[in-house]
Each structure stands twice: as C-alpha cells, then as structure tokens.
Image (tube, rainbow, N blue to C red):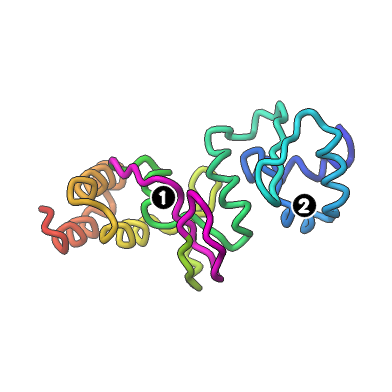
Amino acid sequence: MKKLEQKLLPIARKWAGNIPVWAAREAGVEASTLRHWAKDNPDVENGTRGVYVWYTDDDKIDWDVCETARYLAKAGKDAFLWGPSVLEFMELGDVGEPGFYIAVPTRRYPQLSVKWVVTKKKTRSKYKGMPIQSLKDAIVSSMPILDDDKRRTVLDDAAQRYPKIKDFLRKVGAEYGIE
C-alpha cells in the first residue's frame, strides 16, 4: 500500500469508503494530490463534488452505509443526520421519507434528495459510525413531519428496541394522541 493510501485508509474507514476532500486536507493530503491519485486509480470514482469513493478491499468498511456517508461527507464535518433520516437509518418504524434530512450549521444551496436543516445544536450521537441527531431529539423532530401511522410504528419500534426510554416515548405519543 502506498504511503498516500495509508493516510487515506482511516478516512475511508470512517466514511464508509468515501474520502471527503476536507477530511483528506485535515489529514495533510492536498486536494490536487488526492485528485491525481483518484484519476489514475481504477478503484476510485468521483462520488459527488468534493467526495471520492475508494472501492478498497478493506474489511473494516461498512458498505451498507456508503450512500448515507457520502451525503454527510459532502455536507461537511459539522453535518449530521436529522429527524426522519435518523429513524430511517436506524430502521425504526416505517418512515420511508425520500432523500435525506441533514443538519448543518449554515445555510446550503438546495440539492436534490437533501432537505437541509440549519441548526447550531451539536447534540450528535453516532450510529454505525455516522454522525446523527440523538434518538430522543430525532423522534421529537420527526413527529410533526410524519403521518399518524408512521408515528405509531416509530414509537412502537423504539419502545421495543430501547426499553429504557419507554416513559419518554409514552409522553411523546400522548402529545400526538397515540396511546
């Protein structure tokens, strides 16, 4: 493995095969160096603006979250999944919201498949290595957006998987007429 790839591998592991240019810069790799390496590498493709996807054989990369990681990586280091996207990512309920809700500290240009949520909040957790809004905050944020039947499935699944927060879930359900 080349010296450059040794620097990039931890980034690819963290971002599920994705290499955000901003993360490479933080690791001391110039954008032009990254671009030249990617151009000549058959295992690398330009996933989206500012993010390369490296299809390495490393077994520590969770390819199931590659697309989610790519959207988060493109949004920047302070971005995290928000609301319904957290619930969908954690497979709680039948949310089925199209695209991604991504929280960011500053306004972003509209983008297909992304609903930006501008927030200064930094109450982030991690799930499968990806930055997410805390589960409780995601549930509260999602309730006004979801249909009644989807609310119920989320609360039921969360109560089953996270029994320690049943009282919280009951209170949230009561606010929306779900017993």
Quarter of the image that includes the N terminus = top right
Instruction: Please identify the quarter of the rendering in which residue 141 is found.
Output: bottom left
- Please provide percent x and percent y for residue 10: 72, 44
Q: Which residue is mark 2?
A: 24
Q: Is residue 3 left or right of residue 97?
A: right
* Relative depth, front residue between 91 and 30: 30
Instruction: Please identify the quarter of the rendering in which residue 38 is found.
Output: top right
Q: Residue at x 58, y 38 (%)?
A: 66
- Please provide percent x and percent y for residue 126: 50, 52
- Please provide percent x and percent y for residue 31: 82, 53
Is label 1 in contact with label 2 (beta carbons under 8 Å)?
Answer: no
Please say if 53 is above or below 101: above
Q: Which mark is residue 43?
A: none
- Please provide percent x and percent y for residue 136: 34, 59
Q: Give the distance between the C-alpha atoms of the residues marked 1 and 2, in whole angstroms.
A: 26 Å
* Relative depth, front residue between 51 and 173: 51
Q: Secondary structure at mark 2?
A: helix
Magenta highlight on residue 77: no
Magenta highlight on residue 100: yes
Q: Amino acid at mark 1?
A: Ser
Q: Residue at x 63, y 60 (%)?
A: 77
Write the start and end of the magenta stretch as one range: 94-115
Q: Secondary structure at mark 1?
A: helix
Q: Amino acid at mark 2?
A: Ala
Please say if 175 is above or below 39: below
Q: Earlier in the sequence, mark 1 or mark 2?
A: 2
Q: Residue at x 44, y 47 (%)?
A: 99
Q: Which residue is mark 1?
A: 85
